[in-house]
Amino acid sequence: MASLAGAARDFRSAILFAFVLGLGCYLAWLLRDVLLLLYVSALFAVVLSPLVHATSRFRIGKWQPFRGSAIFFLLVGVAAALTAFGFLALPPVIDDLQGFGREMPGRMPEMLQKLKSIPFMQHLNTSDIVTRIQDFASGAVTSVLLSLRDWAGKLFNVVMGVVLTVYFILEGNGVYRWFLSLVPQGQRERLDQTLQRAKVRMGKWLLGQGSLMLILGVASTIVYLSLGVRYAYALGVLTGALNIIPVVGAAVCIALALMVAAIDSWGRVVGVGVFYLVWVQVENSYLIPRIMKNRVGLPALAILVALLVGSELAGVLGAMVAVPTAVLVAELMDEYLVQKS
């Protein structure tokens, strides 16, 4: 009788556990955007903490100018860099777009006449083409206006992500200790050592990725200036900055540079294409093995798979945190799943 009562109790406990687990999964799905924001902010805090600590320890003689205010000075530096980029890089682009908008109505008939001079193009209906272009332009303006609300929401998420990252950096140790307190006492030290090793590898990833971003940004700016590509400084900065997303970020910026180069001449397009092909070879054969692989310890295939999974789950944000997440997962698997002889 006692065994039957114990079995019934175990059965009820299993049902209750399954119900609580299902309810937790359902709530996690409803709050997936908030949980993703918290995870990304915490991950950025872990990755940026070494930079903050190094800034706070910077000294001039015996004077430590950033002690106790490293985060504030880093935020001011980022804001100043973005402001300088906006003032120096955006005005030429805006001027060209305004000039294009003023000249487009007058140049449209000339462009259509040139098209009609091409063989098999004589039967083009120019009025229909103009109507389609006007409809496309009005539709584009409408889409931009309708998407302002979505952009406002994304901007709010970015601001909240920055605020959460700052709080995680300032109070991260307390949150980390609270998290470890949820783990059984016997497993707490092992998990702590594993996460500390992952933190060190993430810091090395940031240093290596920052080095690649700087090298690509400087090299691309020099090449764009040498080729006479428009907006060379803006494209160079974007090419370096977006390289924080491995492979994908640089490819997007190079495609943008190709389109800008095509405005002036095909020779510049060829020059940009050759530069990108050379860069890929140098990066894969020399820079990544010496800068990234020795620091992060992840094979190239694992990085590509992480990028695919991250971008599929969370878009650009997922791609940005894909490699640090892969480092964390690899460290946990190495500690708990890999059978060591």
Image: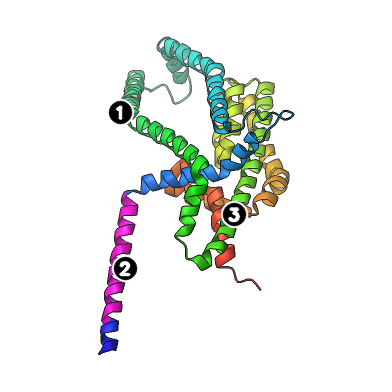
- The numbered mark, 2 or 1, whose residue comes first in the sequence reads 2
Q: Nearer the viewer, mark 1 or mark 3?
A: 3
What residue sits right under mark 3 in the picture?
Answer: 196
What residue span does the magenta drawing correspond to? Answer: 8-30
Task: Using the image as rendered, state which of residue 61 and residue 244 is in the foreground.
Answer: 61
Q: Secondary structure at mark 2?
A: helix
- The numbered mark, 2 or 3, whose residue comes first in the sequence reads 2
Q: Is residue 28 magenta?
A: yes
Whole-number angstrom distance, CA of label 2 to CA of label 3: 31 Å
Task: Using the image as rendered, state which of residue 251 and residue 310 is in the foreground.
Answer: 310
What residue sits right under mark 2 in the picture?
Answer: 17
Q: Secondary structure at mark 1?
A: helix
Task: Using the image as rendered, state which of residue 165 and residue 326 is in the foreground.
Answer: 165
Where, quadrant-wise, is the N terminus in this rendering? bottom left
In this orientation, does residue 250 appear? no
Given the current orientation, which residue lies at the most extreme bottom position? 1
Instruction: Find residue 146 and name its label.
Output: 1
**Is the Cβ of the residue at disc 2 closer than 8 Å to that at disc 1?**
no
Q: Which secondary structure is most common in the magenta stretch?
A: helix
x, y (%) of residue 90? 52, 19
Q: Amino acid at mark 2?
A: Phe
Does residue 78 sit above or below 311 in this rendering? above
Dot 1, how many residues are within 10 Å of its Cα: few (below 14), some (14-19), or many (20+)?
few
Q: Nearer the viewer, mark 2 or mark 1?
A: 2
Given the current orientation, which residue lies at the most extreme front position? 62
Instruction: Find residue 81 and name its label.
Output: none
